[in-house]
Image (cartoon, rainbow, N blue to C red):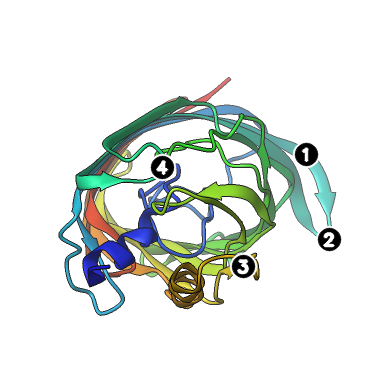
Amino acid sequence: MPREFILISLVTLLYVGSVFASGGGTPYANGAEGFLCGMAPPPGFYLKNYLLFYKAEKMKDNRGNDIKVFDRAIVWADILRFIWITKKKIFGAYYGTQLFIPYVDKDVRFNVPVGPKNKRHYTDRGIPTIIYTPYILTYHLFQNRFHCLFATDIYIPIGSQEDDNLANVETNYWTIEPLWAFTFFITKRWDISSKIMYSINTEQKDCPTVYGINVDRTPGQEFHLDYTTSYAITENLRIGITGYYYKQTTDDDYDIKENMPAMLKEILERDETYKGQVFAIGPGIWYHNKNLFLSVRAQFETGAKNRTEGKNMWAIMIYRF
């Protein structure tokens, strides 16, 4: 079996954000948060709408080399986020909660037939999960120069995973993701912002693989962050540099059966140790007018291992009711 074909097993899990492939599997769309992301808004009800386009024409192996059997992956996503910040305080912080509803359309192509259907082209679309945040605790400190929030996102699968589709948007496992976000105003015009997350995934039953079999799998845990540094041209207009960093921290865990062929067992055991990583950077612009906030960002990935390497575009709108 060619080395490139073995490594293509890294595409067993393609999900909402960056069609990342190898280990891990948080459904968080890396790079979703950017300008002033540590500043939760004042008490009120908000709608935040994310539009995402992601395209990758490269997939990297454990050494960062191209996997030739991979052709391309394209993802479109529309994510609705409903935010409620209350006037109630807990531990000195404003309390809030939120709900995300993502819709995802995915198209994945290979240069050779792979997977349960032994074909080159896989597609899927739908609502893979809902994301519920039971608490958001927001602080505004040091005369409003430093803002931060603490929260935990819970990813709840609601779709029906197809056992023969490598482009599944639906998966049948949960993710618990504690997070901390901050915004620090270095001066009145300059700020640094980041959202820092750690993802813990439960077991995924019947994960489809390129080898034509399904295997129960517990995705590895992941550390990832979004970041932005921006400059206020005017009170309502900011420009900046934005991006993200992703690093899988623990191995995947496949349920490898004793009756599996020896070669397949060896391949799965090797795949368990392949951890994904990637870094992205790009420009962005942010605009505010009364109750409306708009931003557009482009992010270009580099340094990928065990996953796709591509680029994405974000268009984001926030409206306060």
Quarter containing the C terminus: top right
Q: Is residue 16 visible?
A: yes
Question: Residue farthest to the top?
Answer: 321
Helix, strand or loop at label 2? It is loop
Circle 3 residue: 256
* Snapshot quadrant of residue 106: top left
Circle 2 residue: 91
* Snapshot quadrant of residue 51: top left
- Judged left or right of residue 213, residue 135 is right
Quote the CA–CA distance across marks 1 and 4.
45 Å
| Nearer-N-terminus badge (4/2) | 2
| Nearer-N-terminus badge (1/4) | 1
Circle 4 residue: 166
Count neighbours of disc 2 (C-alpha within 10 A) and say few if under 14, some if 14 to 19, many if 20 or more. few
- The residue closer to the viewer here, 306 or 215, is 215
At x 50%, y 74%, the residue is 262
| Nearer-N-terminus badge (3/1) | 1
Quote the CA–CA distance across marks 2 and 3.
46 Å
Instruction: Tell me residue 191's x, y (percent).
Output: 37, 62
